[in-house]
Amino acid sequence: MDKITQPSGTRQFPESLPGYVRGLYITNHTLFDKEKFSEMKKKAKHSGINTFVIDVQPKSISKEILDSIHKENFYTVARVVNFDGGLKSEFPTQKKFDKLKSSVRTACESGFKEVQFDYIRYSDENHSGLNIKKKYRNISTIIEGLKNAGMDCDKNLIFGADIFGRIPFVKHDRIGQNLENFSANVDVIYPMLYPSHFYGQKKRINNPYQTVFDGVTNSIKRAKKNTRIIPYIQGFSMAIKGSKLNLKDYIKAQVKAAKESNS
């Protein structure tokens, strides 16, 4: 178990936060399938899973449902999808932004102690008149607005952000994600280090251990000291053939790398 480092400022990590996170991502649909989710919880307990990252869109999660999960000693994180496919304009419309802020507030009011922002980025296409520094500033502004909405409910609400797996390996990226920038704005960074998504990089695709190890190590080096780095790992069989590992061993290699890289 790693020691929980408190973030800078007045907010504190919740006591329920595990020292070392072993999590599963739960879709909105799965959560509301009582039989399927009940079975998943049983397997999670048996396997040492202590955290669920749960979609809070399109259906919000009631306090009653969340309380029942907490009673079984799972830590929960609210996943809020911001711009599926990436932001195509400089800023979202006010209507869209208000809807996102509402999702954050509702998650907090239901009892989530942490909100995780996903797809908080620009689209892959070029944006005329929008340079990379402006993208960084705009994303910081968006995050700040969403954080304010959550802290109206709980000033100690924890915030995290998902970043593309390539971001720990590059300094600047046209989607507007930068590791240092995110580290300055959130408490937790979740690099999505799926080896299969390093398109054209056979060494990364075929060596799941090294890809996760290097991604976490780079993230820790570049992030602020108090930022927690928690990698998403690949739990599906896309492009695993070249590794000469079966899916089970492909996943185990990533888990081993996550531990040994001090995530």
Image (cartoon, grey):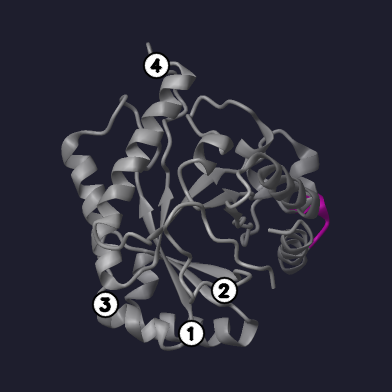
The residue indicated by pointer 4 is 130
Give the x, y percent position of residue 181: 51, 35
Mark 4 touches mark 1? (CB < 8 Å): no
- Tell me the amino acid under the disc marked 2: Pro
The residue indicated by pointer 3 is 63
The residue indicated by pointer 1 is 73
Q: Regarding mark 2 in the picture, which secondary structure is present there?
A: loop
Report which quarter residue 77 is drawn in.
bottom left
- Tell me the amino acid under the disc marked 1: Asn
Disc nearest the viewer among 2 and 4: 2
Q: Regarding mark 3 in the picture, which secondary structure is present there?
A: helix
Outermost residue to the front: 10
Magenta-colored stretch includes residue 153: no
Which of the two labelled residues, at mark 4 and mark 1, occupies the earlier sequence position?
Answer: 1
The answer to whether 50 appears left or right of 210 in the picture is: left
- Quarter of the figure with the C terminus: bottom right
The answer to whether 99 appears left or right of 252 in the picture is: left
Q: Disc 1 and disc 3: Cα gap in Å?
A: 15 Å
- Tell me the amino acid under the disc marked 3: Lys
The answer to whether 195 appears left or right of 174 in the picture is: right
- For label 3, count other residues whose C-alpha is less than 10 Å away and answer few (under 14), some (14-19) or many (20+): some
Q: Nearer the viewer, residue 245 or 162?
A: 162
Asked if residue 191 is positioned above or below residue 6 in the image, the reply reads above
Residue span colored magenta: 241-245
- For label 1, count other residues whose C-alpha is less than 10 Å away and answer few (under 14), some (14-19) or many (20+): some
- For label 4, count other residues whose C-alpha is less than 10 Å away and answer few (under 14), some (14-19) or many (20+): few
Disc nearest the viewer among 2 and 3: 2
Q: Disc 2 and disc 1: Cα gap in Å?
A: 10 Å
